[in-house]
C-alpha cells in the first residue's frame, strides 16, 4: 500500500496554476511538494513508501491502475455525427433554416425545403472538412515525436520468494506514458523531465523551465534540502514535466504524473468547452436581429393577406416564404467560404489555421498580448557586454572568459556557448595557440563558480575563474583597472564593483564575474587555490529579441493594434527587451500587485499598462478577461506550457511550430515562420474576411428587409399576392448565389487600417436606412405595373408578380456595387471580376426566366418590351439615391 498521499499531490498540481480562489488556498494546496523539498533523501523515499532501488512489476502495475498512464489531457475528439450535429444546433441560422425547411415540406413546398437543407448541409460539411484537415496536419506533426525515459526498475524474479532476496534493479528505457509515481528516473543533458519529481542526486544540473515560468535562462537544480522554498516552482530540488535538462546529470523520484502534474493540470483546463469569441457572438447577435425582424413582420404579412384575400392557407405559405426571404440562407456557407479562403491564403504564408473562426478574430483584435520568452525573444543566450570593473568595454575580459569556457572539460552550458560564439575566429585561433589546459576545478552549486588552469607559451600558469558576482567578490583581493593596474579590494572598491554589476542587472542582463591570478606549477589543484584573485571585470548575457519584433510591433501599432507583454519572467529583463525593440513602457505591473487587485481595479489598470511581469498562468488569464470586460478583442501569442490557459481565454490564440504541444493544442493559429511580420499579414487577411462577410450581411439584410417592407404594403393594397411563395424563394436563392463570389472581392485600404468588430447598432442603422430606399422603388414598380401596364386585377397577377420579381432581383444584385465599398462605385472602387461576372450572370438569368421554358413552372409570364426602359430608369435612380444615403451615413457615422 502507498504510504504517501499521492492524491494530495495531484490536487495540488491541478489547482496550483489554475485555481481562481485566493492565493492562500493555493498555498495550502502546494504544501505537500514544499514539504518534500524540505526533507532529506531518506525521508523523501520513506514518505513515498519506496526504497532507493526502484519499483518491482507488482508495484508498477498497482500504481498504474491507481494513477493511470503518464499522459496529459488533450482535446477529445467527438464522433463524426455528434460533431456535425453540434455544428448544426449551435448556429442559430442553421436552426432557423432547418425549421423553415420542415415547415415548407409540410406545406407541400418540397423544392424549397430541399434547397434550404442543402444549404445547411453544405455549410456544416465544408466547415468540418476544413478544420478536420488542419487537425490531421497537427496530429501528423505530433506523431513524429516519441519520448522515452531512463528508469530504475526491479525485474520479475520467481526465485525471490524462495530465496528471500530481492532482485537487483537495472536501468530500462521505457515510454514516458508507462512511468508511475515512485519511479526512479535518471536524467542527463538533453532529456525531457518526464513528470514532476524530487531530485535525490544531482551533478552540475541546469534545467530550462522557461515554458513553465517564462524565465529566459536555465536554472540550477540540486538534490540537497531546500528549506527556503515557498512555492514548488521556486524549489531548487524539484523538477517539473515540460522542462528539460540543459547540462549535468541527476536521479529523481517521481511524485506526480500525467494529469496530476503541474503540466497536466494546465492541459486539463484546456479540454473543456471554449468560450464564445467575438465572431461567434457577432453571428449570433445578427441571427437574433433577423429573428426579431421576422417575429414582427411575418405575423403581420400572414394576418394582412388572410384578412384581405380570405385564403388563410395561401396566406400561411406566403408568410413562410416571407420568413425565408428575411433569412440570409447562405450566411453559413458565405461565412465558411470566406474563412476557408482566408485559411488557404494564410497557409501560403506558412500559417496553419486550426479553427476557421480564428481568421476573422485575427482581423478584429485591437489588443495583442504576447509572452516574451521564445516569442519576442530568440530563446537563446548571447554575450552582450564584456566590461572591466569600471563598466568600460574590455576585449581582455572576453579573452579570459573564452579561455575559461573553452578549456572546461564538462558539458558546456548556454552561457559557455554564448562566450565561445562571441569571440571572432582570429581571436579563438590565437588563444588556442598561446594557451594550453593544465587542470580545472569543476563547477558546484555551493561555490557557484568554476576555474581552469592554463599555461602560456612562456611556461607561466594562470588560474582563471568565473562565477556569480557575490561569490567571486569573496575570493578576490584586488581589482584590475585598465589605466592604473591592480589596486586592493577595499570596501569602497568592492561597493563600486557591485554597482557596476547592479547597473548591468538593472538593464536586464545576467552578470558573471571574472577573476584570475598567476599560480605556481603543482600536481593537483583544488578549491583552496581559488583565493587572492584579481577581479578583471564582468560578462553580461541577454536573451535577445527576434529580428522581426521591432518591425512587427510598429506594423501592428500602425494597424490600430496595441501590444501588451504578459510574461512570467522578471520585470527588469522584460523592460530591457522592450528598450531593444523600441517598445515604450509607461507602466509595468508584476504578479503580486495584480494578485492584490480586484477585477474592477485590474480592468482600469490594463488601460495604461504595457508590461505585466512575473505572472502565473491564471494571472495571464485574468489580464485577458479584464481586457474583455473593457470591450477589447484580444489575441494572445505564446509558446510555453504556462501560456496554455491564456491562449484558450483569448479571442484568438496564436502559437509557433516550435512551441510545446500544450500551447499548440490550445492555439487557434500556428505560425510556421519565425518572422513575426506574418502577424500583420494575418491581421489584414482577417480584416478582409470580416469585411467581405459584413458586405454580404449588410447587402442581404437590407435587400431582404426592403423587400419584405414592400410586401407589407402590397399585401394590404393588392387583391392578389405580390409575389408567389416559390418566386420569393427563387429570388432569394438566385441573389444569394450571386453573392458566393463575395469572398474574392477586394476590400478598401481605409477599411483595413483599423480593427473591425461586430457592431449591431451600425448594421441595424444601415438596414433601416438602405432597406426603405429599395422599398421606394419597389412601390414605384408597383405603380408602374398597376397604372401603366394595367396589371391591376387577379387575372393579371402573373404579370405583376413577374415584373416585381425581375425588378427585385436586378435591383438587389446591382446594388451590391454601391454597398460593397465606401468609395464611389465603378469609378473609385470596382468589384472583383468573379463578383461582377456572377452578378451579371444572375441578372441575365433573371431577365431570361419570363421568356424561358421554365416560366410556367414558376408562374412567370413574358414582359412587354416597354417594360425594360422603365426598369433601367428605376435601377439607375435607385443606385444613385442609395449612393447618396450611404455617403450621408458615412459622413455621420464614419466607415460602414
Image (tube, rainbow, N blue to C red):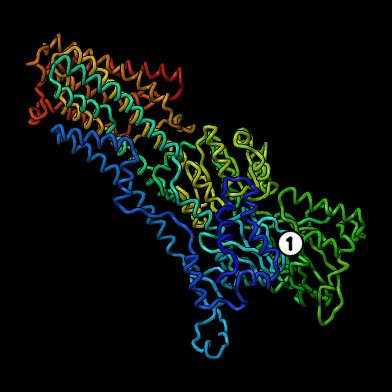
Place residue 237 in its image quadrant.
bottom right
Quick check: 794 above or below 581?
above
Q: How many marks?
A: 1
Place residue 111 in its image quadrant.
top left
Q: Which one is in front, 33 or 491?
A: 33
The spot of residue 693 in percent (x, y) is: 36, 34
Q: Who's the residue at 53% across and 55% down the image?
A: 265
Q: What residue would you read off at disc 1? A: 227
The spot of residue 735 in percent (x, y) is: 24, 30
Tell me, yes or no, if residue 143 can be seen here.
Answer: yes
Quick check: 162 above or below 459?
below
The spot of residue 742 in percent (x, y) is: 32, 34
The spot of residue 727 in percent (x, y) is: 16, 27
Q: Residue furthest top?
A: 787
Quick check: 737 above or below 206?
above
* Quarter of the image with the N terminus in it: bottom right
Quick check: 466 above or below 503?
below
Amino acid at each position: 500500500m502507498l504510504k504517501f498521499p499521492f492524491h494530495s499531490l495531484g490536487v495540488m498540481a491541478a489547482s496550483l496554476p489554475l485555481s481562481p480562489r485566493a492565493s492562500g488556498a493555493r498555498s495550502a494546496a502546494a504544501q505537500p511538494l514544499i514539504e518534500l523539498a524540505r526533507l532529506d533523501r531518506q525521508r523523501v523515499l520513506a514518505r513515498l513508501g519506496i526504497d532507493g532501488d526502484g519499483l518491482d512489476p507488482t508495484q508498477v502495475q498497482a500504481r498504474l491502475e491507481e494513477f493511470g498512464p503518464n499522459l496529459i489531457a488533450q482535446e477529445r475528439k467527438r464522433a463524426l455525427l455528434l460533431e456535425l450535429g453540434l455544428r448544426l444546433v449551435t448556429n442559430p441560422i442553421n436552426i432557423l433554416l432547418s425549421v423553415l425547411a420542415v415547415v415548407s415540406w409540410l406545406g407541400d413546398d418540397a423544392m424549397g425545403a430541399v434547397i434550404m437543407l442543402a444549404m445547411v448541409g453544405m455549410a456544416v460539411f465544408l466547415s468540418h472538412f476544413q478544420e478536420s484537415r488542419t487537425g490531421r496536419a497537427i496530429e501528423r506533426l505530433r506523431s513524429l515525436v516519441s519520448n522515452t525515459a531512463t528508469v530504475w526498475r526491479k525485474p520479475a524474479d520467481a526465485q525471490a520468494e524462495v530465496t528471500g532476496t530481492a532482485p537487483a534493479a537495472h536501468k530500462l528505457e521505457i515510454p514516458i506514458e508507462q512511468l508511475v509515481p515512485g519511479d526512479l528516473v535518471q536524467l542527463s543533458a538533453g532529456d525531457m523531465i518526464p513528470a514532476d519529481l524530487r531530485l535525490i542526486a544531482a551533478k552540475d544540473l541546469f534545467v530550462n523551465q522557461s515554458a513553465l515560468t517564462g524565465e529566459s535562462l536555465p536554472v540550477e537544480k540540486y538534490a540537497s534540502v531546500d528549506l527556503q522554498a515557498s512555492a514548488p516552482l521556486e524549489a531548487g530540488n524539484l523538477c517539473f514535466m515540460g522542462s528539460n535538462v540543459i547540462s549535468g546529470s541527476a536521479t529523481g523520484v517521481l511524485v506526480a504524473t500525467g494529469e496530476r502534474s503541474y503540466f497536466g493540470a494546465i492541459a486539463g483546463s484546456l479540454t473543456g468547452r471554449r468560450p464564445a469569441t467575438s465572431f461567434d457572438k457577432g453571428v449570433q447577435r445578427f441571427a437574433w436581429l433577423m429573428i426579431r425582424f421576422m417575429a414582427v413582420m411575418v405575423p403581420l404579412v400572414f394576418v394582412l393577406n388572410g384578412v384581405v384575400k380570405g385564403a388563410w392557407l395561401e396566406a400561411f405559405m406566403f408568410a413562410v416564404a416571407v420568413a425565408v426571404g428575411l433569412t440570409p440562407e447562405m450566411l453559413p456557407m458565405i461565412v465558411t467560404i470566406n474563412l476557408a479562403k482566408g485559411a488557404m491564403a494564410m497557409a501560403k504564408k506558412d500559417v496553419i489555421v486550426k479553427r476557421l473562426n480564428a481568421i476573422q478574430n485575427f482581423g478584429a483584435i485591437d489588443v495583442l498580448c504576447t509572452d516574451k520568452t521564445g516569442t519576442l525573444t530568440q530563446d537563446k543566450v548571447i554575450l552582450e557586454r564584456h566590461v572591466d570593473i569600471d563598466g568600460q568595454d574590455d576585449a581582455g575580459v572576453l579573452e579570459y572568459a573564452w579561455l575559461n569556457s573553452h578549456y572546461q572539460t564538462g558539458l558546456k552550458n548556454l552561457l559557455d556557448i554564448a562566450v565561445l560564439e562571441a569571440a571572432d575566429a582570429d581571436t579563438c585561433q590565437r588563444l588556442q595557440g598561446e594557451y594550453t589546459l593544465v587542470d580545472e576545478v569543476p563547477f558546484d552549486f555551493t561555490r557557484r563558480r568554476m576555474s581552469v588552469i592554463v599555461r602560456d607559451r612562456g611556461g607561466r600558469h594562470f588560474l582563471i575563474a568565473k562565477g556569480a558576482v557575490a561569490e567571486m567578490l569573496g575570493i578576490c583581493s584586488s581589482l584590475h583597472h585598465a589605466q592604473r593596474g591592480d589596486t586592493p579590494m577595499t570596501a569602497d572598491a568592492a561597493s563600486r564593483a557591485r554597482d557596476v554589476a547592479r547597473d548591468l542587472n538593472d538593464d536586464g542582463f545576467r552578470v558573471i564575474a571574472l577573476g584570475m591570478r598567476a599560480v605556481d606549477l603543482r600536481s593537483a589543484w583544488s578549491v583552496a587555490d581559488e583565493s587572492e584573485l584579481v577581479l578583471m571585470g564582468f560578462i553580461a548575457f541577454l536573451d535577445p529579441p527576434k529580428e522581426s519584433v521591432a518591425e512587427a510591433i510598429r506594423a501592428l501599432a500602425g494597424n490600430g493594434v496595441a501590444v501588451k507583454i504578459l510574461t512570467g519572467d522578471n520585470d527588469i529583463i522584460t523592460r530591457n527587451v522592450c528598450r531593444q525593440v523600441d517598445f515604450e513602457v509607461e507602466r509595468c505591473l508584476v504578479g503580486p500587485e495584480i494578485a492584490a487587485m480586484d477585477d474592477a481595479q485590474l480592468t482600469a489598470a490594463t488601460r495604461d499598462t504595457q508590461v505585466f511581469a512575473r505572472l502565473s498562468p491564471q494571472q495571464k488569464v485574468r489580464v485577458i478577461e479584464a481586457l474583455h470586460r473593457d470591450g477589447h478583442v484580444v489575441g494572445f501569442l505564446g509558446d510555453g506550457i504556462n501560456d496554455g490557459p491564456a491562449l484558450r481565454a483569448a479571442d484568438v490564440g496564436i502559437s509557433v511550430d516550435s512551441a510545446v504541444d500544450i500551447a499548440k493544442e490550445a492555439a487557434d493559429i500556428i505560425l510556421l515562420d519565425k518572422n513575426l511580420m506574418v502577424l500583420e499579414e494575418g491581421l489584414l487577411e482577417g480584416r478582409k474576411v470580416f469585411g467581405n462577410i459584413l458586405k454580404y450581411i449588410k447587402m442581404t439584410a437590407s435587400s431582404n428587409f426592403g423587400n419584405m417592407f414592400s410586401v407589407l404594403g402590397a399585401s394590404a393594397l393588392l387583391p392578389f399576392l405580390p409575389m408567389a411563395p416559390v418566386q420569393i424563394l427563387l429570388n432569394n436563392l438566385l441573389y444569394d448565389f450571386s453573392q458566393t463570389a463575395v469572398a474574392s472581392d477586394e476590400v478598401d485600404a481605409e477599411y483595413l487600417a483599423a480593427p473591425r468588430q461586430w457592431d449591431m447598432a451600425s448594421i441595424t442603422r444601415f438596414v433601416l436606412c438602405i432597406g426603405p430606399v429599395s422599398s421606394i422603388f419597389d412601390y414605384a414598380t408597383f405603380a408602374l405595373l398597376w397604372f401603366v401596364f394595367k396589371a391591376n386585377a387577379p387575372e393579371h397577377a402573373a404579370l405583376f408578380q413577374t415584373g416585381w420579381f425581375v425588378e427585385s432581383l436586378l435591383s438587389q444584385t446591382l446594388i451590391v456595387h454601391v454597398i460593397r465599398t465606401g468609395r464611389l462605385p465603378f469609378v473609385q472602387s470596382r468589384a472583383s471580376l468573379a463578383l461582377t461576372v456572377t452578378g451579371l450572370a444572375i441578372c441575365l438569368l433573371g431577365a431570361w426566366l419570363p421568356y424561358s421554358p421554365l416560366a410556367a413552372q414558376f408562374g412567370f409570364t413574358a414582359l412587354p418590351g416597354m417594360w425594360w426602359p422603365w426598369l433601367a430608369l428605376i435601377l439607375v435612380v435607385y443606385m444613385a439615391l442609395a449612393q447618396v444615403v450611404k455617403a450621408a451615413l458615412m459622413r455621420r457615422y464614419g466607415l460602414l
